[in-house]
Image (cartoon, rainbow, N blue to C red):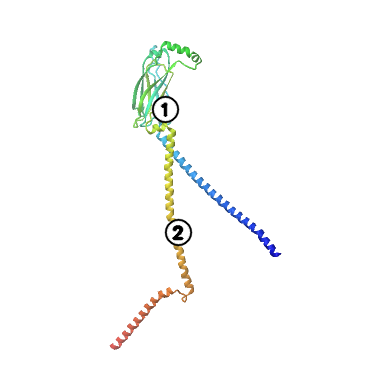
Amino acid sequence: MERHSNLLSQGDAEPSVLIGWMLVKLQYAVFIAMSRARQRLVQLSIVFSFVFLILWIAAFLYGTFYYSYMPQATFSAPVNYYYRTDCESPASFLCSYPMANISLIRNKKHVLTFGQPYRMSLQLEMPDSPTNRELGMFMIKTTCFSQDGEQVASSARSSILRYRSDLLRTLGTLLFLPAFLTGAAEQKQVLEVELFSDFTDNPYAPSVTAVIEIMSSRVQIYSSDLYIHAHFTGIRYLLYNFPVISAIVGVSSNFTFLGFIFIFSYMRLLFQAKPQRFRMSWTEENNQQGEERAVPAGTAEMLGPFHQNPTDERQEEPHSHVGNGTEQQDRDTIGQGEINETEAA
């Protein structure tokens, strides 16, 4: 009965041991999988952070290059004319030509970039009045001055209102009569006069002011604006007209260049670390060999002179023969000296 009960207990214990072993194995497998997943996650996060850092540096470098290399594309400023009205002749409207002084400096920086060609134009908003129609052609003179008052460039352009017949003006007035009555439209003409077609600033005497003078004392003007447009060529033309493609190409090229630099630096560090590891392992092996050699020597000292290796005895035999030979020579010399003394006596 006791033997039968022991067999039953062993039979019941085997499945529990097997289940426990399987649970332990499963737990170990889960632990290995979780550790590998954690390691992969850490590696992916490091790689993602590294790529994001390089991408941010590449974008920053491209933005810095763009804003330092690209000049201001357009510049506009209102033109406010001043003139004299204290003339003696009551028939004239103005006693002097209308003149305006426009500053070419914004935020303590020059608007015009050295070496960049610009196109300057003046936009005039003039009423379609009988006085302007009778005015005919009039001249517009433009002069640029440096900080020292030196004249940098000068130009003179002519302009005139567009011709419209009386019938055309009457039909236009009848057609746009509701707009004219409500104030949504006005009877005016907008003239655009090109002052400089290819103006390049002097780097030794940069322009700081532009003086515009309309050489007519009867001209009537609603408002006036000065427009400066940069005429881009080469890389600046591509950067200005194709900004998205240029940004993609610039950032990707910077990213590739920085990526190669970081990869080569990392490989160089790895190659420098491998010889150090090899030296450390070589020194450890030498230390282990030295310890192994020191162990037999210590055991020989503990055993004493009666427990020496045969190799040690063989090494000591020549020394003993050498010692016996020297003793024999000493004895011979002593005997020979005694014989000489007796013969001399």
The answer to whether residue 214 of the structure is visible from this angle is yes
The C terminus - image quarter: bottom left
Where residue 140 sits, quadrant-wise, is: top left
**Residue 97's spot in the image, x, y percent?**
37, 18
Q: Amino acid at mark 1?
A: Phe
**Residue 204's spot in the image, x, y percent?**
34, 32
Callout 2 crowding tier (Cα within 10 Å): few <14, some 14–19, many ≥20: few
The N terminus - image quarter: bottom right
**Residue 47's spot in the image, x, y percent?**
49, 45
Q: Nearer the viewer, residue 3 or 47?
A: 3
The answer to whether residue 63 of the structure is visible from this angle is no
**Residue drawn at (44%, 56%) of the image:** 277
Where residue 200 sits, quadrant-wise, is: top left
Give the structural element (helix, strand or loop) at label 1: strand
Q: Nearer the viewer, residue 117 or 169?
A: 169
**Residue drawn at (44%, 35%) of the image:** 247
Give how far apart the Cα atoms at labels 1 and 2 are. Answer: 70 Å
The tag earlier along the polypeptide, 1 or 2, is 1
Q: Which residue is disc 2 drawn over?
A: 281
**Residue 150's spot in the image, x, y percent?**
34, 27
Q: Nearer the viewer, residue 76 or 322?
A: 322
Q: Amino acid at mark 2?
A: Ser
Q: Nearer the viewer, residue 169 or 153?
A: 169
**The label number, if any, that marks residue 75 in the structure image:** 1
Q: Is residue 31 above or below residue 236?
A: below
